[in-house]
Image (cartoon, coloured by chain):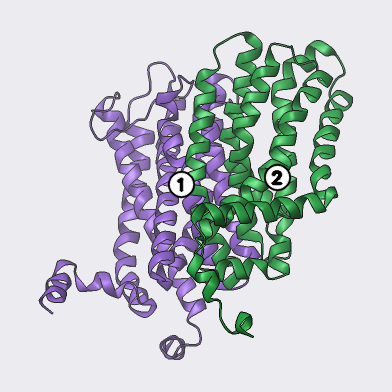
Amino acid sequence: MAKTKTDKNWMPRWFYQLASPRWCYEITGKLLPAFSVLALVLLLGGTVWALLFAPADYQQGNSFRIIYIHVPSAILAQSCYMMMALAGAIGLIWKMKVADMVAKACAPLGASLALLALATGAIWGKPTWGSWWVWDARLTSMLILLFLYLGVMALHSAIENDTTAAQSTAVLALVGLVNIPIIKYSVEWWNTLHQPATFKLTEKPAMPPEMWLPLLVMVVGFYCFFAVSLMLRLRHEILRRERRSSWVQALVESR
Amino acid sequence: MSEIATNEPARRRGPTAVGVFRAALKRDLLLAFRSKSDLVNPLIFFLMVATLFPLGVSPEPGFLALLAPGLVWVAALLATLLSMDSLFRADFEDGTLEQALLSPQPLILIVLARVLAHWIMTGLPLTLMAPLLGLMLFLPAEGMGGLMLSLLLGTPTLSLIGAIGAALTVGLRKGGVLISLLVLPLYIPVLIFGSGAVQAAVTGLPLAGYLALLGAMLALGVVLAPLAIGAALRISVSG
């Protein structure tokens, strides 16, 4: 008895409530405006700062400014995969419906972010390396990440039963997780053309602060934007799957 | 009468883990030997794909020798992939798979035996046939050892990874194309280090590093893949 009491105090109540589709819908509804404003301000402010006020690179000139899109989308594409695998694992182990829905919502978002990272990388590579594409370790492993996302999406759409689809894709996502450390450390393990990571937790960035501060703003802005789009997709998915429950029908009637 | 009413004698003996593994392996090998076409088809495919490249790209020996390590590896990979779809299909359709899932024996052992049997029937013959393809594609003689060794270490990993895809898609009608979508991205690291080993052998560089990485992937696969295959089978069969 005493144990359950302490366990309950250990985590806030809303955290448990996230497991219920109805409460999750309400909580994300409250969080959504704040994250939307934050994403808008950070992305707009970061873009203006990055394009107009950050100094030009002494070698690459103004072409380096694409880094302000390229790096955030690449970081987020990997984070999104880890989130998808984690949500899938939670859904697989504790059979939580909301976790399944989060994992499903992550896949298309992650795929588009990986595509964005590859596209901006190609556009950046043309003036800097002289070619659109190089078969370099970082680029190849990023391409594999995109393929993994596409595989997860294909598997999900091939299975009709929502629960089975969620479980199967969770297994696939967990298997694909081996690729994440390969992407992360590819630039350190293999001496490649791609430059090393811009941000590290333990070291100061190699760039001057006028350059990396707007980048940091952009990264945080991208995370907020990701949170907003994830919540929108999640809410849509909750409504679609819970359409037969009374609270969704009451919600629809009240509108 | 007593035989039907109770399975006490069987339970008292209690098959050991090795016994279960051996019995499952024996059954799978026997079944595979009985259907000869499944055994031969991947090999013919392997040979045909290798024929396509000289005809489609260039029959010039110097050029082919340059491409040979990668070509043989890609052909072996595709041949393994092609044979993957039928890995659990027959067992799924006649209900054997359900019985295996229900049985008290550890599923990991049964799955591992199935994959090992599959490798003996496809990966091993592919490895043994690889020098012939190397010859057809003018792979220098120094590269043959590297080719055989890398395939010997790499094809079991391919079987293990492919089995995850086969287990995920076993209940689906349109499994064929889907399985390649799921499995090919995961095959890429094996391909890179496999063909890298052959390349190193051709140029006379030490290939121990490549082989060690292939061996590491195999060790990781043997330990972790059966867990994923078992989980995937349970989801596919119950869903």
Where residue B128 appears, as percent x and y from the top left, is 74, 29
Q: Secondary structure at mark 2?
A: helix
Q: Split into 4 quadrants, where in the image is the N terminus of chain B?
A: bottom right
User: Which residue position is annotated with label 1?
Assistant: A177
User: Which residue position is annotated with label 2?
Assistant: B81
The reply to whether residue B48 is visible in this rendering is yes
Q: Split into 4 quadrants, where in the image is the C terminus of chain B?
A: bottom right
Vertically, is A95 above or below B147?
Answer: below
Task: Tell me, by letter, which chain the rendering colours purple.
Answer: A
Which residue: 76% across, 15% down? B65
Q: Are marks 2 and 1 on the same chain?
A: no
Query: Image quadrant of residue B205?
Result: top right
| Residue found farthest to the top | B204
Q: Are marks 2 and 1 in contact (CB under 8 Å)?
A: no
> Label for residue B118?
none
Tell me the subunit letter for badge 1.
A
Q: Residues within 10 Å of mark 2 (few under 14, many from 20)?
A: many
Q: What's the residue type where badge 2 is placed?
A: Leu
Q: How many marks?
A: 2
User: Quick check: B101 left or right of A63?
Assistant: right
Which residue: 51% across, 43% down? B222
Query: Image quadrant of residue A68?
Result: top left
Toward the viewer: A28 or B6?
B6
User: Quick check: B53 left or right of A250?
Assistant: right
Where residue B181 appears, as percent x and y from the top left, is 65, 49
Q: Residues within 10 Å of mark 1 (few under 14, many from 20)?
A: some
User: Quick check: A136 left or right of B87?
Assistant: left
Tint applied to chain B in the drawing: green
Vertically, is A247 above or below A46?
Answer: below
Q: CA distance from mark 2 to mark 1?
A: 21 Å
Where residue A222 appears, as percent x and y from the top left, is 38, 48
Q: Secondary structure at mark 1?
A: loop
